[in-house]
Amino acid sequence: MTAETEPTSEAAPTTDGDTIAVAVAAARAADAKDGEAIEVLDVSGVFVLFDAFVLVSGRTERQVKAIADEVERVVREETGRSPKAVEGRDSLHWVLLDYGDVVVHVFVEEDRGYYRLERLYGDVPRLQWS
């Protein structure tokens, strides 16, 4: 793990390098489209199927679409991976990109505030992505 991806909490993450590469690529892609409150959570100690969640907010449905599209493009270019499933493209309030070990959640701000996933998983390590 590089200095850029050191956890911000005291617990050491258990995610592998490929997982971190996908999560960091997704976070940086979201940032490039002005995504807000971007967090990368190491959920490997909570779930068997997932190792990381990337959470990001957009101000409008249009921005949510732009962020999701950019994440998909950048992750494919940088890691060669495409999502196994994409949910929410019809409503654009909460788009979920499922990469298997990494799940990217792109919310409209109001929906993120309602679901509060970072509070639900408040005790998991955060990974530094910037």
Image (cartoon, rainbow, N blue to C red):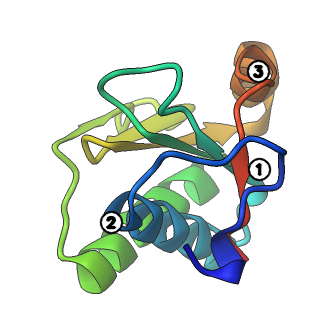
Q: Is residue 89 left or right of residue 86?
A: right
Q: Callout 1: helix, strand or loop?
A: loop
Q: Is residue 67 above or below residue 53?
A: below
Name which residue type carries label 2.
Answer: Asp
- SS at circle 3: loop
Nearer the observer, 115 or 50: 50
Q: Tag 3: Cα neighbours inside 10 Å, few (<14), some, or many (≥20)?
A: few
Q: Which amino acid type is marked by label 3?
A: Arg
User: Which is more N-terminal, label 1 or label 2?
Assistant: 2
Drawn side of residue 13 relative to residue 99, left or right: right
> Dividing the picture into quarters, in which one does residue 109 lie?
top right
Residue 54 in percent (x, y) is at 57, 48
* Disc 2 secondary structure class: helix
The answer to whether residue 8 is above or below residue 22 is above
Q: CA distance from mark 1 to mark 3?
A: 16 Å
Q: Which residue is mark 1?
A: 59
Q: Residue at x 70, y 16 (%)?
A: 115
From the image, state whether disc 2 or disc 1 is nearer to you.
Answer: 2
Which quarter of the image is occupied by the N terminus? bottom right
Front: mark 1 or 3:
3
Q: Position of residue 6 (x, y in %)?
A: 71, 66
Residue 107's spot in the image, x, y percent? Answer: 63, 38
Q: Which residue is mark 2?
A: 18
Between disc 2 and disc 3, whose residue precedes?
2
The residue wearing badge 3 is 116
